[in-house]
Image: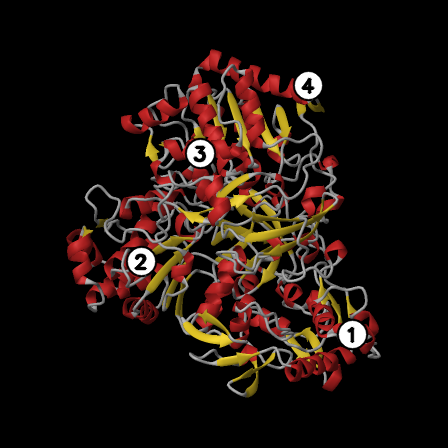
Amino acid sequence: MIRLTVDGLPVAVPEEASLLAAAGAAGVELPALCHDDRMSPAGSCRACLVRADGKVVASCVTPAVAGARVTTDEEELRSLRRDAVALIASILPPRALAATDSELARACRSLGVPAETAQGPGGLGRDDSHPYVRLDRDLCIACGRCVRMCAEVQGTFALTLAGRGSETVVAPGTGGSWAESDCVACGGCVDTCPTGAITQPGPGAGLTSVTRPVTGVTRTTCGYCGVGCSLDVVTAAGEIRAVLPDREGPVNRGHACVKGRFAHGFLRSGERLTGPLLRRDGQLEPAGWEEALRRVADGLREAVAAGGPESVAVVSSARATNEDNYLIQKFLRVVIGTNSVDNCSRLCHSPSASGLTASFGLPGGTDSFDDVAGADCLLVVGANPVEAHPVVGARLLRQALGGARLVVADPRHVGLARHADVHLRPRPGTNVALFHGLAHVLLAEGLADEDFLRERAAGLPELSRLLADYPPGRVADVTGVPEADLIAAARLYGGARRPAILYGLGVTEHLHGTDGVRALANLAILRGAIGTDRGFGVNPLRGQNNVQGASDMGALPDFLPGYQKVGDPAARARAEAEWGAPVPDRPGLRIPEMFAAAREGRLRALWVIGEDVMATDPDTNQVREALARCPLVICNELFLSEAARHADIVLPVTSWLEKNGTFVNFDRRFQRVRPAAAPPDGTRSDFDTVLAVADLLGTDLRCRTPAAALAECARVAPLFAGISHERLDREGALPWPCRDPGGPPEAKLYTRRFATPDGRAHLAAVPYLPPGEEPDDDYPLLMTTGRRWAHYNSGSMTRRGDNLVIAPEDFLDLHPDDAVRLGIADGTPVEVTSHHGRARLTARLTDDTSPGEVFCSFHFPAHGVNSLTSGHADTVTSCPEYKVTAVRVTAAADAAPDAGKPAPFASRGAEDGGVLREEQR
């Protein structure tokens, strides 16, 4: 710490702090119209002048030095600051200071600059083309904060300053309107603008993380991706005015993305369910809650009577809170008597849990993202965080631009790959061979940590023998990655002082996904970069807001809360002592097994909570048959999804913005979720719904509130023994393991020993095996699916708001060489066919994909993308192979102009015959 005095008051500030920060530490608030702590200082507005050791300086750009004597409270300084601010205000029109609470208006009031100072002519015009960003050029002071925010924090570089003299204003860097620019609507420019030149439309106009009100603000955690951004939700009269990034957010640090920041319009969608629906004479009809809950209870009772407890299963929700998931799994085990509960981690990161446990002992990432931010080499594999995890993607890009070496392994040239030192583009399905090739080079060139391998690892002889068969030349033949690129990537990772690995679904969603995770983990073990100060391990980028937490809470068929095996007598005894009921000792059904059991007539009741299995699960036709054959299907939903259209009972439930509880993000942090908006009349939380059904079945689940549920979970699961609502409210985010209510959590794992039985990290000698499907003459292309930046999963939330204006349809990304061969022009409606089904999309020609490969998202289920995907699944965990599907692409028969463009979601209602397939929340 640096010690100095400000106005005679001793203060201590961190190394590299500015005098502005030192003044703040002394309780002195200085105007700083060009400054924002989230980005580099500019020193251009001269509003923060102070005297340091006799010299007048701009405090924002002057570093604090030990022993400095700083003065802020002098009439000369106040006059200089007043003149600087008055000069800035004088070029603006009168409305800039009238009836506004912008940072500029606040500075003028604090310095005694009258509102009449603003007498500029205006007339520069507005840009209202974007649904989430409004530009009033007359209020721009060319401070550059928005430009730096876009470049330094978001990394999009979409903005610039244009014009000359007093007419210099912010503008899209591409020219034209804001809506046509490269803006990704993160809201950073809106949040940093000090004058109101850039605002969001509607009742939240002018609100920023600086100017937000003191009251009417609820701090919660974002319910979209797994980053876990902390958000401040501003409400008035029960309605959301704005969602603002929390400046103190442990992961997002005052940043957000288009979804968390703006995509809350779904809350008041006219399609929101506000009452239960029951199937009568083949039709879903409105009903009251009492009747609906009794039908659920009676149906479950009848299913158990007819087929036993194993005839009932529940698909729990990675969208729901930890407390919801804990109660759901307890209900299944205690009330029904089965372990057949699963969640959608089965469809994405179940290979992560399996592979990381086998390699290291626990099913979570090894390091906190705070630590990863200190890595000098990033190996990002099978992930596009710039679009799928935008806040993490922005931080990683900032890290790379700041000097960290970047290696990206991904078939597509998107996101971080555009900035990589080395971009490896393996053929889909060849990950294991690629990772073995990198490991081969690490060993061959002496880049492995021999001391670590000798003292803390097992399996090196077996792996070494296997790697002899994976020299760079052979790996190049298998993967399509040039030999020189493979060697260069291995040398960057192997030669770094503190490397880190981050990966996504491009590693897990394969026939051999668990093998891929283990082969990737081998690299960190060989390098000694896990559990040491020589690296930051292996870290999965979780896809959904609580996909980690749903599994943590035991919503799995083979694990109790805290990853205690159902076959472990001690674990069952611990749960039974707390629950007062026996726990089944046999693993239950996984999601694919549930559908198979339903098709075969063995499953008599399926309760689906928070997931539209008709939209997100593979091989839609098989899922449809399973729902049709199951005698009782119950869905908890926000909207009438396609799965709900197949249900017998539909229960309308609350969303993440209306719930109380916790989520666990991608780096194992428990964070509080608090209700910010009042739910619609007629809806109930998943938690209350499950409690009510248990009561009707004659069992009191005892934990009657979310706080009580998490407290009970802490008694059942030693990993979480130190976590509670009270502690989270008091201390903020807490990672697991947290074994002691009074002790510290473990953000970095394995610093002393690994959690495996022998305390060592286990290298995996798994051979490369081909994917479930490969191209042939009939299906010559390989299709991969994933996310795009404007939408989320099946789009049920993002398509019920203005994100649909930003991205009204999906595309099939097709390489120009393939397009020429197939006779397909850009924008042509195409039909995509696989062994399993067909879909309809619009072609977009791009070299982001390699020849022979196509890409699309699944945000628009009406296109039918998941009817194309196969039933192939990871051989260990049953995770579907979404990343490798052999397809054929042809021009659609009616390929007239705009023939393939779907109508906006809002114009398609129930009369579409249920074509729309939604994910609930």
- Amino acid at circle 4: Arg
The reply, left or right, for residue 603 in relation to residue 501 is right
Spatial separation of the CA atoms under disc 1 and disc 3 = 54 Å
| Vertical order, 860 against 121 (above or below) | above
Q: Earlier in the sequence, mark 4 or mark 1?
A: 1
The reply, left or right, for residue 19 in relation to residue 126 is left
- Amino acid at circle 2: Phe
Residue of label 3: 711
Spatial separation of the CA atoms under disc 4 and disc 2 = 55 Å
Q: Position of residue 477 (x, y in %)?
A: 32, 62
- Give SS at disc 1: helix
The residue shown at (25%, 56%) is 525
User: Cβ–Cβ below 8 Å for labels 3 and 2?
Assistant: no
Q: Nearer the viewer, mark 1 or mark 2?
A: 1
- Give SS at disc 4: strand
Q: Position of residue 485 (x, y in %)?
A: 35, 70
Residue of label 1: 138
Residue of label 2: 435
User: Cβ–Cβ below 8 Å for labels 1 and 3?
Assistant: no
Q: Earlier in the sequence, mark 4 or mark 2?
A: 4
- Amino acid at circle 3: Ala
| Vertical order, 917 against 300 (above or below) | below
Spatial separation of the CA atoms under disc 4 and disc 3 = 41 Å
Spatial separation of the CA atoms under disc 1 and disc 2 = 55 Å
Spatial separation of the CA atoms under disc 4 and disc 1 = 61 Å
Residue of label 4: 280
